[in-house]
Amino acid sequence: EAQVTQNPRYLITVTGKKLTVTCSQNMNHEYMSWYRQDPGLGLRQIYYSMNVEVTDKGDVPEGYKVSRKEKRNFPLILESPSPNQTSLYFCASSFRNRGLLNSPLHFGNGTRLTVT
Amino acid sequence: GDSVTQMEGPVTLSEEAFLTINCTYTATGYPSLFWYVQYPGEGLQLLLKATKADDKGSNKGFEATYRKETTSFHLEKGSVQVSDSAVYFCALMNSGGYQKVTFGTGTKLQVIP
């Protein structure tokens, strides 16, 4: 089954304790992205990757890191989490656009992170 | 920059009522437009899309028409069901090199029996 898998689904941690949220897709997508979803703000992009070893900042990258060593995986790293990073996080992937063919995003089921 | 504005929710309807969720956008060039749906506890799923002016996207009884003259992509359904209760996001993707998707803030729909 084609899917984007995120782990864990729920995570409670304390300020300053490094954590990693994993994301893996089995659709051979070039493009992957991380979003956070907050009430009243919709989805905001944190980082994205156009292909292996190519990553770039989205709209709200502060406090986050990513890596793309393999095509299927795109982990999100919080080196020193803070309470303002409490949010619902989504990983998404798609084929890279070809000309005007805009490929829709496929989303994981989300990771609810609480930082105390 | 690009932006998407959609109507505030929540929207509460009785089963079999007509649904409209308004969406307008600001973008340069010729974006593709999408509606995504998020059911409780799940990620977003593509509901429908339209890639050029006057295109109509449709799926599961939902429809939306890409109106370039009014920069709108309103979502409609003739008869909603309880199972349609979810959060609906309007989004656009510009055909630029970095493939960014801009989302609206989402509209929560609750359908009551």
Image (tube, coloured by chain):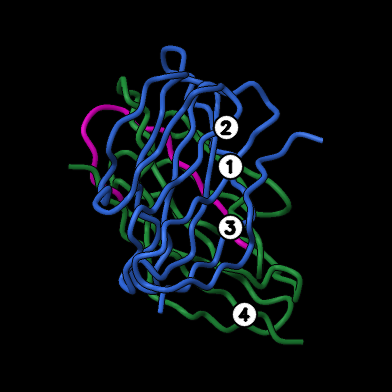
Chain colours: A blue, B green
Residue at x 24%, y 52% (from the top left corner): A62
Check the picture and name the quadrant holding the C terminus of chain B.
bottom right
* Label of residue A73 in the image: 2
Q: Which residue range is magenta in the image?
A: B25-38
> What amino acid does circle 2 point to?
Asn
Please state the horizontal and vertical placement of residue B41, each as a whole percent of the image. Answer: 66, 68
Tell me the mark number nearer the camera, choosing from 4 and 1. 1
Separation of residues labelled 3 and 2 (CA atoms): 15 Å
Query: Which badge, 1 or 3, is on the more N-terminal residue?
Result: 1
Q: Secondary structure at mark 4?
A: strand
- Say what amino acid the circle numbered 3 marks: Gly
Q: Are marks 1 and 2 in contact (CB under 8 Å)?
A: yes
Pick out the residue farthest to the right: A1
Chain to which mark 1 belongs: A
The residue carrying mark 4 is B110
Q: Which residue is mark 3?
A: A110
Q: Is residue B36 magenta?
A: yes
Q: Which residue is mark 1?
A: A23
> In whole angstroms, how far apart are the C-alphas of marks 3 and 4?
21 Å
Q: Secondary structure at mark 2?
A: loop
Q: Nearer the viewer, residue B41 or A25?
A: A25
